Image: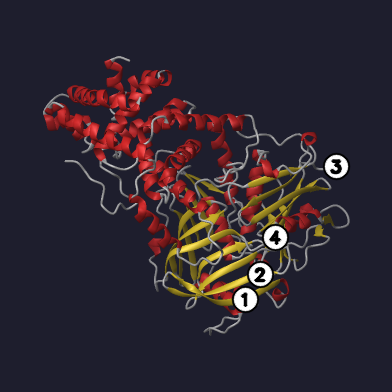
Amino acid sequence: MSLRHARVLAAALGLAVVPGLQAADPPRAWLERMSESLATRNYDGLFTHTAGNQSEVMRILHRVEDGRSVERLVSLDGSGREIVRTPEEVHAYLPDRRVVLVEPRKEDGSLLKAVPAPGPELELLYELEARPGHRILGNDVRIVDVRPRDQYRYGYRLWLAEDTAMPLRSAVLDAEGRVIEQIQFTRLEMPAHIPASAVEPSVDATGYQWIRTGRRGNVRVASVAGWRVRQAPPGFRLVASRFQALPGVPVPVPHLIFSDGLASVSVFIEPGPASGPIPREHATLGSANAYTTTIQGHVVTAVGEVPQNTVRDIASSVVPESGAPALDAGR
Amino acid sequence: MTDQIKEQISALLDGELPQNELNLLVRRLERDPALRLAFGRYALVGEVLRAPGGALASAGFAERVSVAVAAGESAATSAAAYAPSTRRRRATPLVGAAVAAGALFAAVLLLVPEQAEQLQPARIAEPPAPAAVAADIEASGAASPTPARSQRMAAYLVAHGEYSTPIARRNVWTGVLANDPGITRVSYEFSEAR
Amino acid sequence: MPNFPPPDGSTESHDGRGDDPRPGSGLEKTDLELVKRAQRGERSAFDLLVLRYQHRVIKLVARLLRDPAEAEDVAQEAFVKAYRALGSFRGDSAFYTWLYRIAVNTARNAMASRQRRPLDYEADLGEHEQASVQSRLRHVDTPEAVALSDEIQQTVERAIQELPEDLRTAILLREVEGLSYEEIATAMDCPVGTVRSRIFRAREAIDRNLKPLLD
C-alpha cells in the first residue's frame, strides 16, 4: 500500500503515529508502531512458518519507494513459488505448474473500512500486556501478549524488536495458550534502500500460462444486500460489505465483513446448488476456520482467523432481510 | 538375468541407455526383483565411491518405499479412515491456503485437484451419504470434501485474506507457497432440511 | 581423483560430482523419462528413481536429523511425498534437485514435530537449526548397521583396487568425476561402446563381492 494510504489506514485504525516509544509505553502503542513498521519500512528477511507439524521457509521483501509499496514472498522449500504484490495487482508465480495467476487489487475504499480497527473496546475483548523478552537475532525484544477474554477469538503473542517494533516472531494461540501457528524470522535486515530488482520475480515465466481473475472496478460497495446476521458473537460488528466474484459462480456473491477490532470474519452467501442442501462442514487451515451451512436455499460460509465456534455461530445466524435477498443489487 | 540385461541396467544408471531400450528394460525391472536388487547394488557402488562413510539405505528400503506408496494409493481409493499419526498427513492434499489477494488463488486450488487426479484418479472421495454420517467424524480424519467444495473453500479464504491483519495475511500466504498446501481437518455434519 | 565431503558438511553440499545431473545430460533426461512414466502410473519407474537416490537421500536426511536413527523413516516419508507430488514436477529443475528439497523439508518438519518447545522458549530457530546440522557427524544407528556400512565400504574399496586398470579408470571417471560416456571415450581414446562395457564389467566385478553381503 502507498505511504499515504498507510497513514490514512493507521488513522482509520484509531492508531496515532507515535514517534518514539518508551519502555513503559502501553501495549497498544507497541501494536500501533508494529503496524506502521510493517506498512512503511523496507525489510528483507527469512522466516519459518509453522502450523501443526508442517513448516515452510520463506523469504520476504518489502520495498517502499516514492510512496509505492511492493512486497515479494518467495518459498525456499523447493516449489520455487513466489508472490509479488504491488498496489495494482498481485502476481503468483507457480513454476511447478508453469502458471502465473494475476489478481487486480481493489482500491475501492472498502479496504479502509474493513481492516480491523482497534478502538477503546479492544481492551474489553482482549487483555493486552507488554513485557521485555530475551534477545532475538541480536535485538532487544518486547513481548506483546494479546489474550482473548472469551472463547470467541484467538490470542497472539508478538515478539517485537524494541527499536523498530518489527515482529521478529509471532504466534497465534488458542484459548488454552497453545500455539496454533507461528512465524519466526531467522534473518531480518532493514536497509535504507532496496533495489527495485530485488522485488522482481526470479521466475522466468516465458511460456507460462497467465491466468487473470477477478474484475477490475466492477465491484461496488453496497449495503447489506439483503442479508444480515441476527446475532454476532460479542464484539463482532459488521464493518463492510461488498460483492465478491468467485470462479464458477455466475453472480457476484454478497460478502459481509465482521470485525472485533483485531480479528475479522467474512461471510459469503451463495445461491445454493440445484441438487439441494449440501452437508454442513467446517474446515481448518492453521489459524483460519470456516463453517458452511445452508440457509433458505443459500450456501452460507463464514471464515476467519477465529475459533471454530465463532464462525459457526456467525454463519448459523445469517437471515435474509425482509423479502427476497437482492442479489441483483451488485451487478 | 543375462549379462546383456545387466549391462543395460548399468547404462540406465548412468543415464546412457537409448530411449528404445528403455521401455523393455523398465518392464523387465518391474517383473524381476533380482534385477532391481542388482540395480540397487550398482547404485550403491557409486555412492560408496563418491562419498565414503555416512549412512546408507538398508536392504529392503526401496521395497518398503514401494509398499508405502502402494498403501497410500489403495487407502485413498477405498476412502478408508486412517488413524492420525504423530507426523500427520493432511486429510486432503487438495485445498490450498488463503491468500490476501482476492479470488486469484482459487485458481491455484482449482489446479491442485486436477493434478492429484492425474496421478490417482480414485483419490478424492465423495462426501458420505447423509444417512451414513451421523456424528462428527473429524477425529478419524476421514471424509474428504468434493473438489468443488474444496475449491470454493479456498476461494473464500482467499477473498477474506485481504481483510485480515498483516500478520494473519502472511500466515495465509505461506500456505499457498508451501509445497503441500492443505486443509488439515474437515468434518461433515448431517445437514437438516430447512 | 576422489571427492571427499566438505569437512563441515554444509547442508547444501552434494557429495561428489558423479551423480549430479548436469542440464541436458543423459542422467537428467533419463530421470525425466522415468518421472513421466511414473506420472502416467508406472510405479516401477518411480521404484527405479528410489533405487537410484535412496542412499543419497538417507545420507542427507541422517545429516539433518538430531536422531539419525530415524533417517530411514524420514527418508521413506520424503519419497512418498515426492511420489504424491509428482504431478507438479515439470522438469524445470533436475529431478534430484527437486527431491533434495523435499527431503530437506521433510527432515525439517520431522525435527520440528519432535521439539515441543514451551511457549516461552526464546531461542532463534535459525541458530537452533544450525546447531542440529553441526551435530550431523554422528553416524546412523545400530552397531550392526555401522559394521555393515564399514564392511560395504571396505569391500568396495578392495574390489576397486583389484580391478584391471582400464575398468577402474572407466568407473572412477563415471562415478566420481561425473563424466559422460562420450567424455570418457575421449579421455580413454576408445569407442563409447567400450566405455559402456568397461563400466558394466567393473560394476559386475565389484558386485560379485558385494552381493553376498547384502542378499
Q: Earlier in the sequence, mark 4 or mark 2?
A: 2
Q: Mark 3 lies on which chain?
A: B
Can you identify the residue that label 4 sits on?
A265
Residue drawn at 42 percent across, 21 percent down: B30
Residue type at tag 3: Ala
Q: Quadrant of residue C51?
A: top left
Which is closer to the viewer, label 1 or label 3? Answer: 1
Q: Quadrant of residue B95?
A: top right
**Disc 1 vs disc 4: which is toward the camera?**
1
- Nearer to me, C96 or A264: C96
Of circles 3 and 2, which is in front? 2
- Looking at the image, do the residues carrying marks 1 and 2 touch, with CB atoms under 8 Å apart? yes
Q: Does mark 2 fall on the same chain as mark 3?
A: no
Decide which of A179, A185 is in the foreground and name it: A179
Would residue A288 be found to the left or right of residue A89 on screen?
right
The residue lying at 48 percent from left, 64 percent from top is: A70
Report the residue marked by disc 1.
A129
**Residue A64, x across and y down, in percent:** 46, 70
Give the letter of the chain under mark 1. Answer: A
Determine the CA span between mark 1 and mark 3. Answer: 47 Å
* Residue B64 in view here: yes
Can you identify the residue that label 2 sits on? A147
Q: How far apart are marks 1 and 2 (CA)?
A: 8 Å
Asked if residue B102 lies left or right of residue C29, the reply is right
Q: Which of the image's four quarters has the C terminus of chain B?
A: top right
Q: Do labels 1 and 2 share a chain?
A: yes
